[in-house]
Amino acid sequence: MADLVNFTIDGRAVQAPKGTLLINAAKQAGIQIPAFCYYDGLSLQAACRMCLVEVEKTPKLQVGCTLPVAEGMVVHTDSPQVRKARKGTLEFLLTNHPLDCPVCDKGGECELQDMVFRYGAGQSRFIEPKIHVDEKQWSPIVFYDAPRCILCYRCVRICGEGLGVGALGIGNRGAAAEIVPNRGDHLECDECGACIDICPVGALTSGTYRYKTRPWEMEHVGTICTHCSNGCKTTLGVRNGDIMRANNRDRSGVNGEFLCVKGRYAFDFNEHPERLTSPLIRSGGELKPISWAVAIATVAKKFSEIRRVGKFGVIGSNHTSNEENFLLQSFARQVLRTANIDHHRTGDVAALIDALHGRTAALATTADLFTAKAALVIASDLAQEQPFVAFQLRNNARLNRGHVYAVTPGPVREDNYATTTRAEPGHEFEALETLREKLAAESELVILFGAAIKGDGIRRLVQFGDSLGAPVKYVCLVDYSNSRGASDMGLLPGLLPGYRSVREEGLEPGLNYDQILAARDLDALWVVGANPLSRNTLTSAGAFIVVQDLFLTETARRAHVVLPAASAYEKNGTVTNVCGDVQKLSRGPKTMGAKTDLEIVSLLAREMNEDSGARTPEQVFEIIRRTVPGYNVPVSVIETGGAAATAPVNGRVIHEPAPELIRSAGNTLFTSGTLGRYSNMLNRVMESPGALYHDPRKAPIMEQGSVQMEELQRPQ
Amino acid sequence: MRYNEPSPLETRIVSQRFDLPNPTSIDTYLANDGYVAVKKAFEMTPEQIIEELKTSALRGRGGAGFPAGMKWSFVPRNTGKASYIICNSDESEPATCKDRLLMENDPHQLFEGMLIAGWTIRANKGYIFVRGEYRYLIEILERAIAEAYDRGYLGKNILGSGWDFDLYTHTGAGAYECGEETALLESLEGKRGVPRLKPPFPAVAGAFQAPTILNNCETFSAVPWILRNGGQAFADLGTPKNGGTRLVCISGHVNRPGVYEMKMGYNILALINDVAGGMRNGKKLKAVIPGGSSSPVLRADECDIPYDFDSLAKAKSMAGSGGLVVLDEDTDMVAVALRTIKFYAHESCGWCIPCREGTTWLKKILTRFHEGGGRPEDIDLIAELADNMLGRTFCALGDAAAMPTTGFITKFRNEFEEYLKKSHVARVPQLALV
Amino acid sequence: MTFSAELERRFAKLLDSYPSGRQRSAVVPMLLYAQDEIGCVTQELVEEVARRCGVTPLQVDEVIGYYSMLHRKPLGKYHVQICTNIACQAVGGEQLYEHASRTLKLGNKEVTSDGLISLEEVECMGACAWAPAIQVNYDFHHFVTPERFDNLMQALRDGTYQRKAS
Ligand SMILES: Cc1cc2nc3c(=O)[nH]c(=O)nc-3n(C[C@H](O)[C@H](O)[C@H](O)COP(=O)(O)O)c2cc1C
Ligand code: SF4
Ligand code: FES
């Protein structure tokens, strides 16, 4: 335990570690010191002066957000003098703040409103004209209303310190001071919207949410973002079954502050007019709507026929929940009696599990990324492809002085604070040798590697890690929201849930993804939440094709039966993120006509008289907990919105190597496969003049070495 | 060049060479005790130099009057890290115009003071931060710096001491706040002149986050004399704890406004009547703003006091930067109060709420008041707003704006009340505009 | 972007003045010296300074907004600044400014149509004891009366104005 000091707040004796800032020490003691500019994890500003408190034996009021507690200190946070100061400051603040709360998006959840309600004066003595400046639109997403801005600089800091983008600055001075974007009149940035969410008032508003609704008219549903593998917690604001916004102002979940543009704004695919709302059946060369009952009966009948004589190919999804994946593979293997099941693999998780020989402690969790003494990134443009992972590493470097190394083919955003080395694909190990000495000097290391490292490459990487001498953990960087779960749940031809070999059950591995599509004699292709025919061709001309999806994708267009599926935002269940952390999906909106893949598989099972009995996600999750190695995670953690680490294997994996099947989706910050294509917001961002998307290699916004960590790190 | 006739009553310490022919030349300097003190310093330990400064009772001439010896003693020495010497020649406190003369007429004296500071903490680089408007001084300073390099008083192995010191000028670009020491350091680092959190103080983490001695131009300029003549001799010139002399910038309604070097503790009335030639046009003295525009105004009847830091503090004002504005009976104090707050509103960097909003609000009220739209309750409101700023802002600029405002209201409340009689109700806004 | 040889020399010296890795320090001086040569801060200059000092253009923008001497629009060939702060106010600074504004037909920060003269009311510029004071570009003029002011302006127009030796 760090040195503790004893001091008094509002007559209460309190202890806190030496150096704790008074504002935090008070919070721990249950006393709230009001603040606008103070924000946990960002540099100290002491600019808003709301946190002034009285400290005995000091003549002036003291600044609670920068004052470290000291032995014997006697603090009053609610004395008449303090109250007067707060009221005075609020009165100052309101002089140039438009009192347009009735039309302000922030009304109802505005920190200024709350503060005035609690500490302010009911009446203003200000009768002078206010300074007016017109509102500006900086990008499709970001709008700035200068008069509402209270200059707390949270937005500037989250963008520069937190994201490493540095797209916001301060213009002018004095009363004319305002926030300015990096391209004069517009923003060139990640459009992540962190600035908007962190703004305590309605100065920054989003193009997706502004003037649409009021906070109290929405239901707030905490769930997991469905766009990439990082598994950020997001709170959906749902009104009348529609998502109005997604944010994380409560900072709960593994990602705390963080969400990227996709997490905050690309939920609009969910309401895209082309969402499928009715099952379709091919008749006369055309897909025509039919009822669910007919559709299910048709598929069940066809499947029952084929399973006696024919050859199935099942392609699962890296978007669907663990429960759905589990049920799909068990249905495929047990009911359809086929081993031909696979999914689009974006990283060779199985090879990593195998290379680790059961050392489950060598799998890094999301939380580890923020605390590890050192991290090494290989073959990934992290900030583009793994936004939250990049955020974790950057903030580990900033707040915990973690070291970050990167071996990448081109420039990456990490360049501006990490030790980076360029290596063409295939030459990563040569570059690693040049870093060996530095890496060996680290007391612990997390190695994160992209899809370019697969199969034997992973074995070699683990050998390299072992040779360093210190404990090493690994993350196999996969692409989609449940890529990791798809792998863990056995959507692989040779592996059962938990990486048990099918041979353990006396079975032979089935056809893999490419083999399924290439098989001339395939009788049925069942695609659940995937779009293989967007890039590949199907060889078998006579296959009966069933597709479950949100949209009429390239694959769905070829189907005989299309079943409209619910999105991840419309279902309960669990997903496993890139680091193997399991988190809970909660149903927010609803699309009439669509069903979850779990429901669809269950309906098929019932129709085929093969009902497994488990029909709710909770029931399936219980089975997963009991039967899948590593998934026996505490339910309470997940139920309360937490992330539980999985350790999916206890021994050697009998792995069927097929490194050619590992194909990164190549998603960037502004793309996320099919879902991304149906997000109008993402498309608008990409078309906007500031979009970095035009040149994804433009990754490093700030100059190399431009981040002076000393300035970002806290004084204490 | 000097812009006013000297006075026989002056005690010429830092201005001793001002009237010599060719004053900026290093030859003039060398022929008149120049660079003697630094040689002496090379024979002294840092402790001895600091002790001498402490004895001299030299207090910072930039405004706050902090004892220079004490400040130097706070700087960690032998840390193995680089350290820096920064001269504050931002000179932007209204009514102050003395650093200009020091740089214009005796640049080498300033360099020598900085050299001694540099030697004391073994710093190897110094910067003179000159306000942007003083471009001509940059040219003068740079010529003098070049001369000093030529003669071996700057550069490598100075006078065989084995110690190197480089000196540079650095220009501001129009911002009063950059006179505040930490805002100055930010500006020196190429950023907006927004003050830094303290602690750490510049002594420990100043320029480029390294240990730094930062003093006003006049403070450094006094150091060579102190080392040559001893701290005691300097202390003896002034009053207790207020050593030496001070360049007093006398402006306003006097017959001979000018900058005069006076012993610390010279009586203010004597400054006006004897040194500055008395009141202009035979008018009566009404008020004095004693130490730059941020010092609270003194009524005529409060001016019979010594001009030094402690006496003025006792009178609830400040000796500040040495800028003394003399105001006669015809002066409109509301107009002076308005012009003062206009300045602070213009110069507030905008970082913190009470300063940014407080100065603007006060400016608006006083403007309205001055234009004849005053309400009786405005007087107390002005006082209360100033009070709400005082001691609550991020840096001292807020205080610098609040203190004089309070001063005008309390000392000349009657004049504000007079204004109300001229007030036109029609000009008083009735409703807040949203 | 090209600058005069003299300015390039100055830039080189500037960049050399600061500890290594701290070239950002040169941002403000570079902008001001370059502005003196080209008349105002152009977008091209912003990007050039950003490049030379290793900062983002935004970081340069932030600086420009802060310092009152940096401006994005050209001023007159002669920029006339009149102080009206308290010391100058006491001896007629405000009246002098009004006189200037009336006779030059210029408001604050405006430029004559021929681009010759611009006018600005400024804060204290360190000439208080010799007030009222004005600056024409970087030259100080002390004890300025309306008559002296008119003569000075005439000299600017006649081309007989002599820059003060520095
Ligand atoms: C708003 C503000 C403006 C200041 N302006 C100046 C200035 O122009 N020149 C100066 O020497 N000190 C100025 N100071 C004081 C400096 O912060 C600092 O105390 C001083 O330069 C230290 O030098 P000294 O101890 O030799 O006085 C200012 C302080 C404040 C708060
Ligand atoms: S826009 Fe919002 S977050 Fe940014 S400084 Fe203004 S009030 Fe703070
Ligand atoms: S008050 Fe005008 S120059 Fe000082």
Image: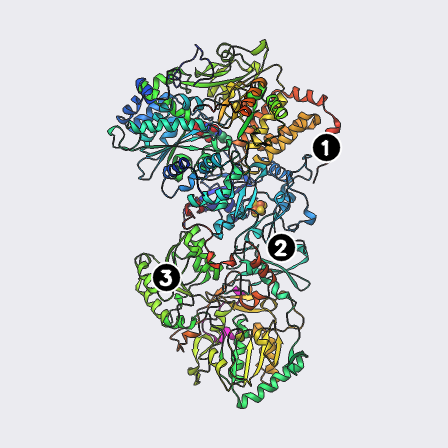
SS category of the residue bearing label 3 = loop
| Chain at tag 2 | A
Inspect the magenta stretch and tell me whether residue B382 lies in it.
Answer: no
Three-letter amino acid code at the position of disc 1: Pro
Give the residue number, with chain letter if any, for mark 3. Answer: A423
Instruction: Name the residue located 36 percent from the left edge and 63 percent from the top edge.
Output: A472
Q: Rate crowding at label 3 as few (under 14), some (14 to 19) or many (20 or more) other CA atoms within 10 Å.
A: some
Judge by depth and name the residue closer to the eye, B95 or A202: B95
- Residue B429, labelled with which disc? 1
SS category of the residue bearing label 2 = loop
Three-letter amino acid code at the position of disc 2: Gly
| Labelled pair 2, 1 in contact (Cβ < 8 Å) | no
| Chain at tag 1 | B
Residue A670 visible in the picture:
yes
Quadrant in which residue B200 is drawn: top left
Q: Position of residue A349 (x, y in %)?
A: 43, 70
Q: Rate crowding at label 1 as few (under 14), some (14 to 19) or many (20 or more) other CA atoms within 10 Å.
A: some
Inspect the magenta stretch and tell me whether residue A637 lies in it.
Answer: yes
User: Spatial distance from mark 1 to mark 3, Cα to Cα?
Assistant: 69 Å
Task: Compare marks 2 and 3 and give the one earlier in the sequence.
Answer: 2
- Residue A207, labelled with which disc? 2
Q: Position of residue B294 (x, y in %)?
A: 53, 26
Q: Is mark 2 within 8 Å of ligand 2?
A: no
What secondary structure is the stretch in magenta mostly built from?
helix
User: Spatial distance from mark 2 to mark 1, Cα to Cα?
Assistant: 37 Å
- Considering every residue shown, the one lying at the far front of the view is C158
Part of the protein shown in magenta: A621-638
Q: Split into 4 quadrants, where in the image is the C terminus of chain A? A: top left
Q: Position of residue B184 (x, y in %)?
A: 45, 34
SS category of the residue bearing label 1 = loop
Instruction: Name the residue located 50 percent from the left edge and 59 percent from the top edge.
Output: A254
Q: Is residue A354 above or below residue A255?
A: below
